[in-house]
């Protein structure tokens, strides 16, 4: 944990609208992956309300257009929709190739949780491929656009599911272990946190700040694969609204007080404390902030993409 913990005036009860109330983003450009549902909608809504030009990067363009129209009715900056399937490297490459100009804010929000075992065309386990590798390819592909912005922010969404799921480098794709949907999700969210650690180390000199956001426990369609048996395995969560869940992402993407703060893990709008067993759904595990693991994951990710012809 960093010697000086970053705190803000906001709390678990704060909403995205609260966080951005005094911030103006006119002239700034933002991308929100998974911006047509759940906390992605509220993240995009808050950014647009502050004047940002927001692109909803979504698998379902029709659903994205409906969301964009809803956001436009409340005023603010322009809202666009672009197709992006994070489990499809071709789709990611197309998004990156067609992006023009600089990019000030990238919110890596989309994800899949507790999905039945499935693999991408490359043979990668779906949750790791979508939640981490997809966003890794997207962010690295947009690096130059982020650097061109001058003071860009990248937000990588994790989850308290990471707490008991250190990344098993020797079996990232569950090739030798029995497949466990919840564990696979947790490991993918450890990976998204480690991405922020290494990306910030590599990119801070380019004016790009990268942090991890845990949105807390929010009831959205992300949990559509959860069964009663799955829920029985989980600790008792304190659930928040989508507007509250979006607050930490918006904070990390916009709040001036975090201008030079990077490579850290935030929850409830403040830097998380180290995990302790007496608070089973809060805090950050050491394995999600380990700089050696973060550097190793970065290289593994590059190698996986290259081996599949996407390097």
Image (cartoon, rainbow, N blue to C red):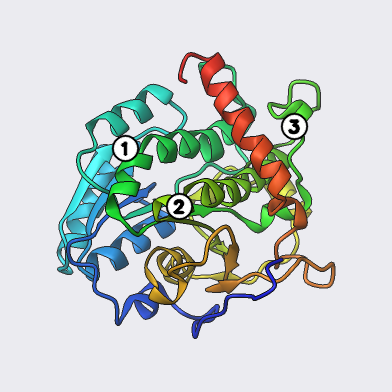
Q: Residue 211 placed where, x, y %? A: 52, 58
Q: Which dot, 3 or 1, sits closer to the camera? A: 3
Whichever of callouts 3 and 2 sits on the residue coming sooner in the sequence is 3
Instruction: Name the element at disc 2.
Output: helix
* On-image quarter of the N terminus: bottom right
The residue where tag 1 is placed is 60
Q: Residue 264 placed where, x, y %? A: 59, 61
The residue where tag 3 is placed is 169
**For residue 18, above or below residue 226:** below
Q: Residue 104 placed where, x, y %? A: 30, 55
- The residue shown at (15%, 65%) is 73
Q: Dot 3 surroundings within 10 Å: few (below 14), some, or many (20 or more)?
A: few
Count how many numbered circles sit on residues in the image.
3
The residue where tag 2 is placed is 205
- The residue shown at (31%, 56%) is 150
Does the rendering let one see residue 120? Answer: no
Instruction: Name the element at disc 1.
Output: loop
Whichever of callouts 2 and 1 sits on the residue coming sooner in the sequence is 1
Q: Is residue 116 left or right of residue 89?
A: right
Q: Which dot, 3 or 2, sits closer to the camera? A: 2
Residue 217: image quadrant is bottom right
């Amino acid at each position: 944990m960093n010697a000086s913990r970053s705190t803000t005036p906001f709390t678990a009860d704060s909403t995205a609208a609260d966080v951005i109330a005094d911030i103006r983003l006119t002239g700034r450009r933002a991308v929100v992956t998974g911006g047509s549902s759940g906390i992605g909608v509220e993240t995009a809504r808050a950014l647009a309300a502050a004047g940002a030009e927001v692109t909803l990067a979504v698998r379902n363009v029709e659903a994205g257009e409906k969301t964009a129209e809803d956001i436009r009715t409340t005023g603010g900056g322009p809202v666009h929709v672009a197709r992006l399937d994070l489990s499809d490297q071709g789709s990611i490459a197309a998004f990156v190739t067609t992006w023009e100009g600089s990019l000030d804010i990238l919110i890596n929000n989309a994800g899949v949780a507790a999905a039945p075992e499935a693999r991408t065309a490359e043979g990668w386990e779906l949750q790791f491929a979508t939640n981490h590798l997809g966003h890794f390819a997207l962010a690295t592909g947009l690096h130059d656009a982020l650097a061109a912005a001058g003071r860009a922010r990248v937000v990588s969404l994790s989850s308290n599911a990471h707490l008991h799921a250190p990344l098993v480098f020797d079996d990232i794709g569950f090739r030798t272990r029995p497949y466990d949907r919840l564990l696979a999700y947790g490991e993918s969210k450890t990976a998204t946190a480690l991405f922020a650690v290494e990306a910030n180390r590599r990119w801070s000199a380019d004016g790009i700040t990268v942090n991890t956001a845990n949105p807390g426990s929010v009831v959205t369609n992300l949990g559509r694969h959860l069964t009663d048996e799955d829920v029985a395995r989980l600790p008792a969560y304190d659930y928040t609204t989508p507007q509250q869940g979006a607050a930490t992402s918006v904070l990390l993407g916009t709040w001036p007080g975090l201008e030079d703060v990077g490579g850290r893990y935030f929850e409830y709008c403040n830097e998380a404390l180290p995990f302790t067993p007496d608070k089973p759904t809060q805090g950050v595990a050491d394995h999600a902030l380990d700089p050696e693991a973060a550097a190793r994951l970065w290289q593994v990710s590059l190698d996986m993409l290259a081996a599949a012809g996407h390097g």
